[in-house]
Image (tube, helix red, strand yellow):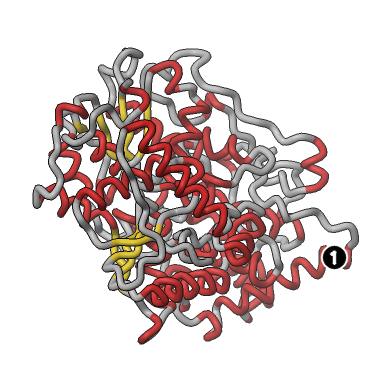
């Protein structure tokens, strides 16, 4: 096993059982009260059986649970051949739409390492060389140079083509592509505007589209399940309608509100597209949306049709073909209802999938205007269509900025404006806005719970975000009688928040709570006869 300081891109082809090992004491220190001994859970080790079956030789973590070791030399050779075939394709005209930014990022990196200082995973891992953004990019460059350039074929290591390419090399590179949240903070920071996350995504795409290898939670239990049932959760139409009915009854019982979800309302102005996970894991979020939109008198609806009630599109993270299938099906469902626009709920991933990427996948009459919920929510507050009592939210509140909403779409102020109006003790994280750090759950990490991958996510990928949260509440953290609320207007980010708060037992020990923006808005409504949050009762 190498000292991480001595690790070089060419070492990805070494025969070591494991290249590096992470230890808690080598990670970025956490702020009080988690700077004390015994406050941080240990890092999970891979089981011996996992080492035999999967690729645990990168750093001991397994993200690609469908990547299994070959049984014969022929299988290994075929594995490498398929990867090289896919690698050649991503640099061809067949990769239309991504080819130009891919080539720019691949060919013009100045190796200045500015991106490293911007990367939350690299910094959280104690500046570990393996997680430096350009590390995987350099591995890819060496492989391309070795197989697809004359100089590399003739001169090898003299021109940088100094890497052994075998099953272990490619498998480690596949795993390494899932040590990046695709948050694009590196791209924002790069003096040349280059984007290392493109290279990570393209490696994932080769593994999925060319080799049939993708994490089970993203593909089999994600995209495939969504195409089959309409939802990545497996929530079928009958189950969805039953869930809405239950939520209506539950809301009346709890709050005395005769809630009604409009479903399949033809010609409505707005189709609200939620992450279906909200209906199962955080039902208070779609309930809060319904209360606000009904009280404001908006003409809106939900769809009960397959693909019309789940904004998820996991293909965006690993497979362009799957992403397009889902995006077009979602547009078709909206078109069938004749709505004027789709409003995407509190899901950052869905913002990028439906508004940015989806907009490029549908053409002409197949398109429906897609907008973020956040400007609409601020308009409801600013126009006084909702009567608010800020004193009901008189506890410390901080805001997490979902990468896909803020950095990738520039929607920065509406959510802040709402919080400034309804939360007297609102405080910012440092840094915030477009400079925010990823929650650590981005690009699928929040739902990737196979083998020991959650240990990487909770200890490393989400570490910087947890430190930001601790920083925002310094002076209040250790007072367990004081509610402290993390506003995370994104389903995927809430999944990461749930995981790290459980990992560090932060809710139990320090009364650290989390949720969305609309829940805070409903809690502040003058019309509410009791708190919307159970933790305030």
Residue 412 position, x and y percent, is 22, 52
* The N terminus lies in quadrant: top right
User: Image check: 179 left or right of 493?
Assistant: right
Q: Is residue 59 above or below residue 260?
A: above
Q: Is residue 173 above or below residue 481?
A: below
Residue 501 position, x and y percent, is 46, 28
Q: Is residue 203 above or below residue 501?
A: below
Residue 175 position, x and y percent, is 63, 52
Question: Which image quadrant for residue 228?
Answer: bottom right
Secondary structure at numbered mark 1: helix
Question: Which image quadrant for residue 60?
Answer: top right
Q: Which residue does the image show at 39% across and 18% down from the upper left?
A: 510
Q: Which residue does the image show at 52% across and 27% down from the upper left?
A: 503
In depth, the one of 34 and 301 nearer the eye is 301
Residue 285 position, x and y percent, is 37, 44
Confirm whether residue 203 shows in the render: no
Residue denoted by label 1: 75
Number of other residues with Cα within 10 Å of mark 1, as a class: few under 14, some 14 to 19, many 20 or more: few
Q: Which residue does the image show at 25% across and 34% down from the upper left?
A: 523
């Amino acid at each position: 096993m190498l000292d991480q300081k001595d690790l070089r891109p060419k070492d990805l082809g070494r025969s070591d059982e494991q290249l590096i090992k992470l230890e808690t004491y080598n990670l970025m220190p956490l702020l009080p009260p988690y700077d004390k001994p015994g406050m941080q859970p240990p890092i999970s080790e891979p089981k011996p059986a996992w080492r035999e079956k999967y690729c645990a030789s990168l750093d001991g973590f397994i993200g690609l649970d469908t990547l299994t070791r070959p049984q014969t030399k022929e299988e290994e050779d075929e594995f490498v051949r398929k990867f090289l075939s896919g690698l050649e394709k991503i640099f061809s005209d067949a990769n239309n739409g991504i080819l130009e930014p891919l080539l720019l990022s691949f060919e013009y990196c100045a190796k200045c390492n500015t991106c490293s200082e911007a990367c939350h995973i690299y910094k959280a891992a104690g500046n570990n060389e393996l997680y430096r953004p350009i590390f995987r990019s350099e591995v890819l460059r060496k492989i391309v140079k070795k197989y697809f350039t004359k100089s590399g074929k003739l001169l090898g290591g003299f021109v940088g083509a100094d890497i052994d390419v075998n099953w272990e090399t490619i498998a480690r590179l596949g795993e390494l592509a899932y040590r990046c949240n695709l948050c694009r903070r590196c791209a924002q920071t790069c003096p040349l505007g280059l984007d290392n996350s493109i290279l990570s995504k393209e490696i994932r795409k080769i593994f999925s589209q060319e080799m049939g290898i993708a994490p089970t939670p993203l593909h089999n239990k994600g995209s495939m399940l969504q195409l089959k049932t309409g939802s990545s959760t497996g929530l079928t139409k009958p189950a969805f309608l039953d869930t809405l009915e239950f939520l209506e009854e539950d809301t009346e019982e709890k709050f005395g509100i005769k809630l009604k979800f409009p479903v399949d309302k033809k010609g409505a102005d707005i189709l609200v597209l939620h992450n279906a996970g909200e209906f199962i894991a955080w039902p208070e979020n779609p309930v809060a949306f319904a209360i606000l939109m009904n009280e404001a008198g908006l003409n809106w609806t939900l769809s009960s049709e397959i693909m019309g009630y789940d904004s998820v599109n996991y293909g965006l993270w690993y497979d362009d073909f799957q992403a397009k299938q889902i995006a077009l099906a979602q547009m078709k469902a909206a078109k069938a209802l004749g709505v004027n626009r789709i409003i995407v709920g509190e899901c950052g991933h869905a913002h990028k999938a439906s508004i940015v990427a989806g907009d490029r996948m549908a053409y002409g009459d197949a398109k429906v205007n897609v907008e973020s919920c956040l400007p609409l929510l601020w308009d409801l507050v600013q126009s006084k269509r909702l009567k608010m009592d800020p004193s009901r939210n008189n506890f410390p509140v901080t805001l997490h900025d979902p990468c896909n909403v803020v950095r990738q779409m520039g929607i920065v102020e509406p959510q802040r404006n709402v919080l400034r109006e309804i939360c007297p003790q609102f405080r910012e994280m440092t840094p915030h806005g477009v400079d925010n750090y990823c929650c650590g759950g981005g690009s699928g990490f929040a739902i990737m719970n196979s083998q020991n991958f959650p240990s990487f996510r909770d200890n490393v990928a989400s570490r910087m975000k947890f430190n930001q949260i601790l920083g925002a509440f310094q002076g209040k953290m250790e007072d367990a009688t004081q509610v402290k609320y993390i506003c995370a207007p994104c389903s995927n980010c809430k999944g990461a928040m749930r995981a790290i708060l459980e990992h560090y037992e932060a809710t139990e020990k320090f009364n650290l709570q989390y949720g969305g923006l609309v829940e805070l808005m409903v809690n502040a409504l003058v019309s509410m006869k009791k708190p919307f949050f159970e933790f305030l009762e």
